Image (cartoon, helix red, strand yellow):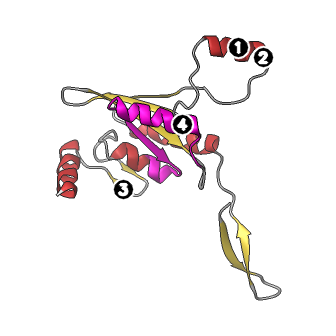
Amino acid sequence: MACEYQKDLLTDRWRSVPIATPKEVELQVQLVSMLRWCLRPDVIFFHCPNGGLRENKREAAKLRAMRVLPGVSDLMFFWRSVNSFRALFLELKRLGGRLTTEQAAFGLAMRTLGADFEVASSIDEAIMAVGMRGLIRPGVEVCGRRWPEREQLNTMAKKDAL
């Protein structure tokens, strides 16, 4: 758990105080509400409800029969690039959270197939992962940053590669 230091008013000593980190569900709900207004209209994104507890064995068996895949990312983004179809699989984690074995295997499989896979532990990291792929509408300011046109993003990426 993350901690910060505060000065105790009575003893005048510094003490460690735990910081409440948002749950993954809270992080995802906040992120999705931001993405709804800032993504380009041609980007499709959604959540696949694989996680959570099952109410009974019958429901769990039904989901297994329907091929629920363990480790699938929290959010999936699909869009058309110049002459190709692109995909981003975004896994959200609490601060200090780690990927499960199934999530890591899924991410590796997606990268092997040519899709993008990212892990974010904050809204800023998630917006950066989405924005660097040119999925945020040009000129929109999100998380204190105004996103440029896709051509400018490509130019910046080429300069970084040199």
**Disc number placed over residue 145 in the picture, else none:** 3
Residue 136: where, in percent of width, then height? 34, 41
Q: Earlier in the sequence, mark 4 or mark 1?
A: 1
Estimate how packed mark 1 is, as few (under 14), some (14 to 19) or many (20 or more) residues with alpha carbons within 10 Å. Answer: few
Q: Earlier in the sequence, mark 3 or mark 1?
A: 1
Say left or right for 125 vs 66: left
**Disc 1 from disc 2: Cα separation:** 6 Å
Residue 110: where, in percent of width, then height? 40, 31
Mark yes or no: residue 43 visible: no
Residue at screen point 57% across, 38% down: 101
- Helix or strand or loop: what does disc 4 sit on? helix
* Residue 65 or residue 144, whichever sits in front: 65
**Disc 4 from disc 2: Cα separation:** 23 Å
**Disc number placed over residue 69 in the picture, else none:** none
**Disc 3 from disc 2: Cα separation:** 47 Å
Which residue lies under the disc numbered 2?
Answer: 57
* Residue 13 or residue 146, whichever sits in front: 13
Q: Amino acid at mark 2?
A: Lys
- Give yes or no for contact between labels 1 and 2 (Cβ–Cβ under 8 Å): yes
Residue at screen point 78% across, 84% down: 9
Which residue lies under the disc numbered 1?
Answer: 61
Which residue lies under the disc numbered 4?
Answer: 103
